[in-house]
Image: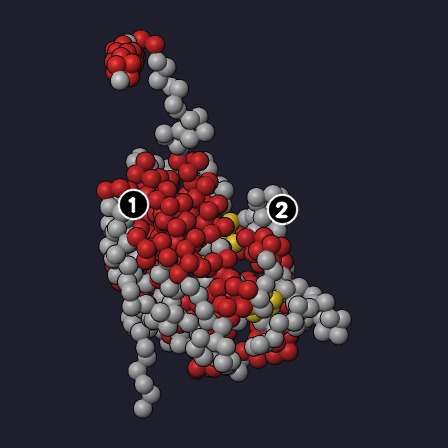
């Protein structure tokens, strides 16, 4: 016992000596990790955010693969994707999307906004991307944490803000971004791998995104179409100005759907989408949208309900090539917004038809389709369309053009399925009704008591109000 006490006293004495003289001999940089600096430049943060958004937030398989199965671009034929086809989606299935949206995207964008004092371009870019992220998140989850989020250990259980308040935040962010990016002398900045740091290109994207998010309220706000049409002034003006993340064919740089198909491959093209392009419309975009099947008698075909034919066409190069881009907001979408808004604000039928043809043409051009024979036929067909059939044609063509984009899931809900998709009719489906909502993420269910507990796949988000019953 004495030996132990003596040793303990000696140890304490040595520690006291060391602590008393540490300023003289301890190198205070020893515990600094050069690979994890305490202050990261905005350029580095921005590059990482854009890459994460392209791979997870906007183009991730937990988002686009799921919504594309529900929107009948793809058919799940095995494992998790087959469950998605049958309208099963668990809290754990989308946990990664939730976590990365908050930790790798929104938290870092908040950091840029906080650091960007005096630099309107960095601030404006971060506000555009934050508005886009909030829009993507709230449109699948409804209420989400925001005003009480991003406080770290100060608040690990933030309250959920209503979707209505999240939309107010989206508009506020985009309005300020438009001011920031339109500032005289706003500089070109580093770290932006989508627009090269050019503020005027980001300004166009901000206008187009504002029009998108105004349009989302069309079921509950009759002024949405006029407001969105006004917001389009100054929007994206060409395919070359699309806001998209460009992947490349190299390790760790490949498109997320390409990686999914190589690693999992449990989806094929859906029969509904293939038949629409091939048999109904003879659409020249088909070779870009779908791969050639392994059945020589049927070069292009998709799986229908309860079909798991592994020889069916797979997603094509437009969305599943190693270097396929992930679009955030595009010229094509901007033109479709314009066509719909012109129709809904009682523009002349000639104006609406011309806007629709311009949107379809831009989509063809984006994917390099040869439409020299097809377009004159389509133009003649459109010349007879008016009223509700013309509106249905606008939304059907938008569904085709926004292939594998989550925005189609928004359009399907806010128009109450004007394009006429039929739900999975099988007994294996959880419900014979296309879902409208994501489940809450498992991590939030486990650790945040404020997480809503009355949500299922058929719950409706705020702007997706049921239409009045027809008399």
Q: Quadrant of the N terminus?
A: top left
Residue drawn at 35 percent across, 61 percent down: 440
Could you tell me which secondary element the residue under label 2 belongs to? loop
- Where residue 327 is drawn, which disc sits there? none
Decide: few, some or many residues near mark 2? Use Cα within 10 Å; few <14, some 14-19, many ≥20: few
Q: Which residue carries the number 1 mark?
A: 150
**Are the residues at dot 1 and dot 2 in contact (C-beta closer than 8 Å)?**
no
Which residue, as the protein is rendered here, is positioned at the far right? 296
Q: Position of residue 62 (x, y in %)?
A: 47, 58
Decide: few, some or many residues near mark 1? Use Cα within 10 Å; few <14, some 14-19, many ≥20: some
Tell me where residue 137 sits by quadrant: bottom left
Question: Depth-wise, is mark 1 or mark 2 nearer the camera?
Answer: 1
Q: CA distance from mark 1 to mark 2?
A: 35 Å
Tell me where residue 208 sits by quadrant: bottom left
Describe residue 117's horizontal placement relative to residue 394 as left or right: left
Could you tell me which secondary element the residue under label 1 belongs to? loop
Q: Which residue carries the number 2 mark?
A: 249
């Amino acid at each position: 016992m004495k030996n132990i006490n003596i040793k303990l006293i000696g140890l304490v004495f040595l520690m006291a000596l060391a602590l008393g003289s540490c300023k003289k001999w301890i190198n205070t940089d020893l515990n600094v990790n050069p690979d994890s600096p305490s202050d990261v430049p905005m350029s580095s943060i921005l590059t990482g955010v854009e890459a994460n958004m392209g791979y997870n937030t906007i183009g991730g398989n937990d988002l686009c693969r799921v919504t594309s199965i529900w929107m009948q671009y793809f058919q799940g034929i095995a494992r998790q994707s087959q469950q998605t086809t049958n309208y099963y989606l668990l809290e754990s299935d989308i946990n990664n999307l939730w976590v990365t949206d908050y930790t790798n995207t929104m938290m870092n964008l908040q950091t840029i906004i906080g650091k960007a004092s005096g630099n309107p371009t960095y601030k404006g870019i971060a506000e555009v991307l934050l508005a886009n992220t909030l829009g993507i998140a709230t449109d699948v989850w409804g209420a989400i944490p925001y005003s009480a989020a991003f406080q770290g250990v100060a608040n690990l259980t933030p309250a959920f803000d209503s979707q209505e308040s999240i939309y107010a935040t989206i508009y506020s962010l985009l309005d300020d971004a438009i001011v920031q990016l339109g500032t005289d002398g706003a500089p070109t900045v580093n770290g932006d791998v989508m627009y090269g740091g050019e503020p005027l290109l980001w300004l166009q994207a901000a206008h187009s995104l504002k029009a998108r998010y105004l349009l989302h309220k069309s079921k509950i706000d009759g002024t949405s179409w006029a407001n969105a049409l006004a917001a389009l002034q100054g929007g994206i003006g060409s395919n070359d100005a699309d806001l998209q993340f460009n992947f490349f064919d190299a390790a760790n740089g490949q498109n997320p759907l390409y990686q999914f198909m190589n690693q999992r491959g449990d989806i094929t093209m859906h029969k509904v989408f293939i038949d629409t392009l091939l048999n109904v419309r003879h659409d020249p975009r088909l070779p870009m949208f779908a791969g050639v099947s392994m059945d020589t008698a049927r070069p292009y075909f998709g799986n229908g309900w309860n079909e798991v034919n592994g020889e069916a066409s797979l997603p094509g190069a437009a969305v599943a090539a190693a270097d396929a881009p992930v679009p955030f907001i595009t010229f094509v979408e901007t033109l479709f917004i314009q066509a719909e808004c012109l129709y809904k604000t009682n523009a002349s039928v000639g104006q609406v038809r011309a806007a629709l043809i311009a949107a379809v043409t831009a989509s063809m051009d984006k994917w390099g389709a040869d439409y020299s024979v097809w377009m004159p036929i389509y133009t003649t067909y459109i010349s007879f369309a008016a009223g509700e059939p013309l509106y249905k044609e606008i939304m059907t063509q938008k569904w085709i053009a926004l292939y594998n984009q989550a925005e189609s899931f928004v359009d399907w809900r806010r128009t109450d399925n004007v394009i006429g998709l039929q739900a999975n009719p099988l007994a294996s489906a959880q419900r014979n009704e296309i879902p409208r909502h994501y489940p809450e993420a498992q991590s939030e269910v486990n650790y945040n008591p404020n997480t809503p507990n009355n949500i299922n796949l058929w719950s409706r988000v705020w702007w997706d109000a049921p239409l009045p019953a027809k008399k």
